[in-house]
Image: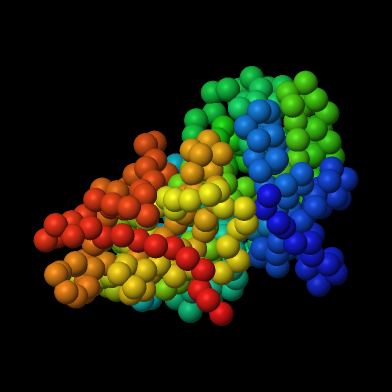
């Protein structure tokens, strides 16, 4: 169904501690993420998706590098980097913390882990965030050390994840709350185990703290999962869109601000602490966002390939946005996608600004009640002068 391309390996691109295991268990395609190889397909995107839903899957996500901030000013610098108020984040807790630049643009959307009173990890998306944080720390003279620790995540995904994790690490895993973590040493291997992961399925993330033990950890889980329908997989685009999860540089990037992509609740303009982009975000909020990320359906036959480039979105022959990610969802039995749209008002003869998506957008961003909207007829049920807005997503003719 979906076609995936292979990649040539070289010493120039780093390999994760689990790389040999991914090759051993049949990885067929890789991508490059944070200057590292990331396995993206084993039996195929649909086949991997189905295996995950019927068992437990091991994901090599060692590409999720950590930016560690440690020292007396660790909390101050961490807060300065993000518009989200992190003061309530306790030791042993993780928090989704989008980072912005001085213009309010999104630099990354990492998960932050508070490891200790004076130590934070930012589990980053694709990009050279380490250099940014080091520059900010030096330029603003924060008393911290910013580096990349020896930490490499491995995820367990699927309905049998808890059974596998408890079988290997103990029954305490059953009581681990969402976005909470615990530091342990198991079989002499240091690690942090967190109840989170890159899907809306049942998942855990193991932050290995010794890169020499990667294959050993993988085999430990693989052997324990033999009666739990264990398989190898990787971040799956079908699961991601079904769960309403965004991917930095795929769905959103630095040209977007938090208000455009549903991160409104993660911006605290009322906090006393300053943060990068605070003035810019206050101005953006006052004017209102000019674009919105939404979920949509595309009618017609099932899509059989991933879009390698964004597809333009048209209303009445005028381009109003881009569709960045599109898949066929087996569970929903429909084509679903993410669309970035300019906000506009529909008059009798002209299309200008304003489209109301606040309610729709909140749902389609993967909260408990995910909603996708039909993009072929009455897409957003938004009518003025009895005229319907119809969206059409199609490939750009070369």
Q: Is residue 345 left or right of residue 155?
A: left
Residue 151 coordinates in the image, percent (x, y):
69, 52
Write down the quadrant of residue 165 in the picture: top right
Residue 24 coordinates in the image, percent (x, y):
88, 45
* Res. 370 visible in picture: yes
Residue at 39% across / 62% down in the picture? 392
Residue at 44% across / 53% down in the picture? 298
Residue farthest along the front direction in this orientation: 300
**How is colour applied across the structure in the image?**
rainbow
Q: Is residue 214 above or below residue 321?
A: above
Residue 11 coordinates in the image, percent (x, y):
85, 69
Residue 328 coordinates in the image, percent (x, y):
55, 47
Q: Nearer the viewer, residue 69 or 314?
A: 314
Residue at 70% across / 67% down in the picture? 35
Q: Is residue 55 left or right of residue 189?
A: left
Q: Nearer the viewer, residue 47 or 101?
A: 47
- Count how many numbered circles sit on residues in the image: 0
């Amino acid at each position: 169904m979906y076609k995936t391309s292979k990649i040539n390996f070289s010493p120039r691109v780093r390999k994760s501690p689990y790389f040999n295991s991914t090759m051993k268990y049949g990885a067929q395609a890789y991508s490059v993420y944070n200057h590292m190889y990331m396995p993206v397909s084993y039996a195929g995107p649909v086949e991997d998706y189905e295996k995950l839903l019927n068992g437990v899957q091991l994901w090599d996500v060692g590409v999720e590098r950590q930016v560690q901030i440690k020292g007396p000013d660790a909390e101050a610098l961490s807060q300065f980097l993000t518009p989200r108020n992190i003061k309530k984040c306790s030791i042993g807790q993780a928090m989704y913390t989008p980072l912005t630049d001085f213009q309010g643009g999104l630099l990354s959307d990492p998960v932050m882990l508070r490891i200790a009173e004076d130590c934070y990890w930012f589990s980053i998306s694709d990009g050279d965030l380490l250099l940014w944080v080091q520059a900010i720390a030096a330029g603003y003279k924060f008393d911290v050390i910013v580096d990349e620790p020896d930490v490499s995540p491995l995820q367990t995904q699927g309905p049998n994840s808890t059974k596998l994790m408890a079988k290997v690490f103990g029954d305490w895993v059953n009581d681990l709350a969402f976005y909470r973590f615990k530091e342990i040493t198991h079989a002499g291997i240091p690690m942090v185990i967190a109840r989170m992961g890159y899907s809306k399925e049942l998942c855990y993330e193991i932050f290995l703290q010794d890169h020499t033990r990667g294959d050993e950890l993988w085999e430990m889980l693989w052997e324990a999962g033999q009666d739990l329908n264990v398989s190898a997989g990787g971040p799956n685009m079908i699961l991601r869109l079904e769960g309403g999860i965004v991917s930095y540089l795929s769905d959103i990037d630095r040209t977007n601000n938090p208000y455009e992509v549903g991160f409104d609740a993660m911006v605290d303009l009322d906090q006393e602490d300053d943060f990068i982009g605070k003035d810019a975000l206050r101005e953006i909020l006052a004017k209102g966002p000019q674009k919105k990320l939404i979920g949509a359906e595309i009618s017609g036959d099932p899509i059989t390939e991933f879009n390698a480039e964004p597809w333009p979105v048209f209303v009445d022959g005028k381009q109003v946005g881009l569709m960045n990610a599109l898949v066929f969802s087996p569970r929903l039995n429909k084509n679903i996608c993410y669309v970035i749209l300019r906000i506009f008002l529909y008059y009798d003869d002209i299309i200008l600004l304003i489209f109301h998506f606040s309610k729709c957008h909140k749902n389609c961003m993967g909260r408990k009640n995910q909603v996708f909207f039909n993009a072929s007829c009455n897409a957003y049920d938004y009518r003025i002068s009895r005229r319907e807005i119809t969206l059409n997503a199609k490939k750009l003719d070369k």
